[in-house]
Each structure stands twice: as C-alpha cells, then as structure tokens.
Image (tube, rainbow, N blue to C red):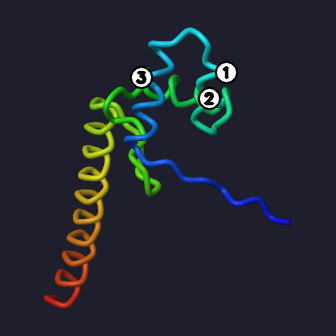
Amino acid sequence: MKKVRKIYDKAFKDKAVQLSIERTNVSELARELGITAPQLYKWRKEFEEFGEGSFPGKGNLKLTPEQEKIHELEKKLKDAELERDILKKAIGIFSKSGR
C-alpha cells in the first residue's frame, strides 16, 4: 500500500520551529505534533538558513536576498543576450537584401 505524504503549511512549520527552540526535548515535541524528530530538525535548519523566506511552498525557490538579486540579474542578462542575437540576425538579413 502506498504511503500518503502529509503536507504541512507554513504557519504549522513556523510554530513547530519556534516551539522546538523553546523546548529542550525535541523528540517529545515531535511526537506531540505528529511528525518525526529528523523532520523537525530539518525545518529548524531551513529556518536558520533562510529565516522568513523559509517554507515558500508550491516548489518556489528558497533564496536569500543576495541569491534573489543574482537570479534576477541572470534572467535580465539572458533576455538581453537573446535580444542582441535577434538584432544581429535582423541586421544580417536586411544588409543582404539591400545590395
């Protein structure tokens, strides 16, 4: 039989992380919440790394502000390169037909 994967929302994960920081026994807290201790530690690590950007959901990227800026600039560069290539081809086509 196939195991059904549980999905937890951002609010649940945030609260679980906060509780795990406040309490000393993470395993007991995990049992109370109905999750595994390794899962709770994984959420804590993600929260420590990304802060409020943690747990975006729906396959969105978890990026630090610096990574977001780099991603945005890379996208702009790719668009500019594509535009340049199109203009180069257009110049080549028009210069041949004008002779």
Who comes first in sequence, dot 1 or dot 3? 3
Q: Are marks 1 and 2 in contact (CB under 8 Å)?
A: yes
Q: Position of residue 83 (x, y in %)?
A: 23, 66
N-terminal of the pair, mark 2 or mark 3, is 3
The reply, left or right, for residue 33 in relation to residue 46 is right
The residues bearing labels 1 and 3 have C-alpha atoms spaced at a distance of: 14 Å
Could you tell me which quadrant the C terminus lies in? bottom left
Q: Secondary structure at mark 2?
A: helix
Residue sitting at x 40%, y 33%: 14
The answer for how far apart the CA atoms under marks 2 and 3 are is 12 Å
The dot on residue 27 is 1
Q: Position of residue 19 (x, y in %)?
A: 45, 22
Where the N terminus falls, by quadrant? bottom right
Secondary structure found at label 1: helix
Can you give x and y, in whole percent of width and height, for residue 45 in the image? 52, 23
Residue 54 occupies which quadrant of the picture?
A: top left
- Position of residue 11 relative to residue 59, above or below, is above
- Callout 2 amino acid: Ala
Left or right: 92, with 61 as reference point:
left
Going by the image, does 64 lie left or right of 45? left
